[in-house]
Amino acid sequence: MEVDKGKGEAEETRKVAEADRDTVTLKSSDGKLFEVSKEAAARLSTVLAGMIAGGSIDDNGTDLKQIGSEALENVVDYCNKHANSIPSAALISSSISFNTAPFKEPEEWERKFVDRLSHDALFDLVEAANFLGMERLLDVTCHKISEMMKGKSPDQIREVFNIKNDYTKEELEEIRQELAWAFYDD
Amino acid sequence: MEAPTTGDVPVPEAASYRDWSELPLDALAWVFGKLGAVDILMGASYVCHSWLDAAKVPELWRSVDMSNHVVVDRIMGTGTIDKTRGGDCTAKDEAEDGKEEPGETLFCIGVEGSVAEKPPSPGLKVRFLKYCSDVSNEGFSQLEDLTLLYCDDVGGRDVYEATGKACRQLRCFTMMHDEDHDQLGREALRVAAMHELRSLTLQGCDDTNNELVCILDGCPQPHTLSFSTWMAAPESSQTMLFGLSVLGSALLHFPPLRK
């Protein structure tokens, strides 16, 4: 059925076809493929937006070697949900400063979205969001993590997050003195 | 009342197998940004080395809000200050002609000592203090916006000059006191030491109209002025109004004329 076409022409046809698609295919580190709304991906991820604009999206699955399938599934799920529930791009702040950027509280569905995640899945999702430059997803996941930390002692935090205490006694004392400026009461 | 249905939402695992000390620094700093200063300083920083590194990201310390935190309430509860007022922070000042009055020190942000090697405080642009009895003006060379609410140790004749010298970038200065406070005296002219000042708000000050005129004369680039509860009535309104004509906006609130 195929007429013999020059390679360049075939390439062009492929590119046009790709440009017409309204989804992009992403491939996880373990080789699983996921479809995501192109509009949402470009809007929510600076990295994916760059790849889409730069034409480095592979029709057969763009390799994201740093992201496992579970995390990528969550990313894609988030993008698609976002595409359906929030049409406004104004949600994403352009400022990247931590404290001054107006933080919009997670929507109900976003809260549910992160609440169902295991600790490990949350960790992977934060890493993926960070890697993909997804500010809003970082906001939502980091908000969840901060809620898990609030009011807890260092020991309690280590327990929740499976962190080994890599300080020596002397180092801890040093930090205490270093941070004493905040809480001195002499 | 029915319990909310969770549907097929899986219950999160209790334990974590990932090593959270390996979370990328950017992401950690993002988390800490949501956490607030008190939890960073009392919890997160002590967890492990990599978390301490994230806690030192300068962006986290451009603005510090320690109010309405349970720890602040607790510490404030031990003082004589009414904790229902909510609380904040900070150090000590050289107000009152250099003599320091004893008082409860609640918090200090960016005082001497630890500041030198740490990025947080010197870059601080905005500082908001409320009910702090001991306030320092050191280590705030970048400060652009200073608010002192009911910090009763701050005042006296040198307050403008000292503040102006300590905070050379200051553009906005707000000071309020509960009761009449000897804030300016004849030293009002020294407001000129605040070279960059655009906005000045004073409330609960015991200043006379002459001093207001001095402020207007001394304030090099005024844009917004706001005063209230003055003890004196505007005697030379004309002078004053002339002074005010350079302002972008002004809010003056005078009490009834007194003898």
Image (spheres, coloured by chain):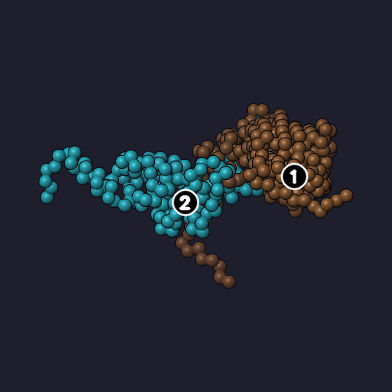
Q: Secondary structure at mark 2?
A: helix
Tell me what residue is drawn at x 71 percent, y 32 percent.
B193
Give the side of residue B181 with respect to residue B129, left or right. Answer: right
In the image as oriented, which residue stretches furthest toward the top?
A: B117
Which chain did the image draw in cyan?
A: A
State whether residue B177 is above or below residue B168: below
Tell me what residue is drawn at x 55 percent, y 53 percent.
A105
Viewer-proximal residue among B89 and A80: B89
Eye-nearest disc, 1 or 2: 1
Rendering coords of residue A29 (x, y %): 37, 42
- Which hue is chain B drawn in? brown
Rendering coords of residue B217 (x, y %): 72, 36
Q: Which residue is mark 2?
A: A90
Binning the other alpha carbons within 10 Å of mark 1 as few (below 14), some (14 to 19) or many (20 upward) gives: few
Viewer-proximal residue among A146 and B154: B154
Amino acid identity at mark 2: Ala
Q: Mark 1 — on which chain does it sit?
A: B
In the image as oriented, which residue stretches furthest toward the bottom?
A: B1
Tell me what residue is drawn at x 42 percent, y 45 percent.
A45
Q: Mark 2 — on which chain does it sit?
A: A
Q: Is residue B205 visible?
A: no
Q: Secondary structure at mark 1?
A: helix
Rendering coords of residue A48 (x, y %): 38, 43
Viewer-proximal residue among B237 and A56: B237
Q: CA distance from mark 1 to mark 2?
A: 49 Å
Q: In which quarter of the view is residue A132 placed?
A: top left
Rendering coords of residue B191 (x, y %): 73, 35
Amino acid identity at mark 1: Gln
Tell me what residue is drawn at x 74 percent, y 38 percent.
B215
Binning the other alpha carbons within 10 Å of mark 2 as few (below 14), some (14 to 19) or many (20 upward) gives: few
Residue B238: image tag: 1
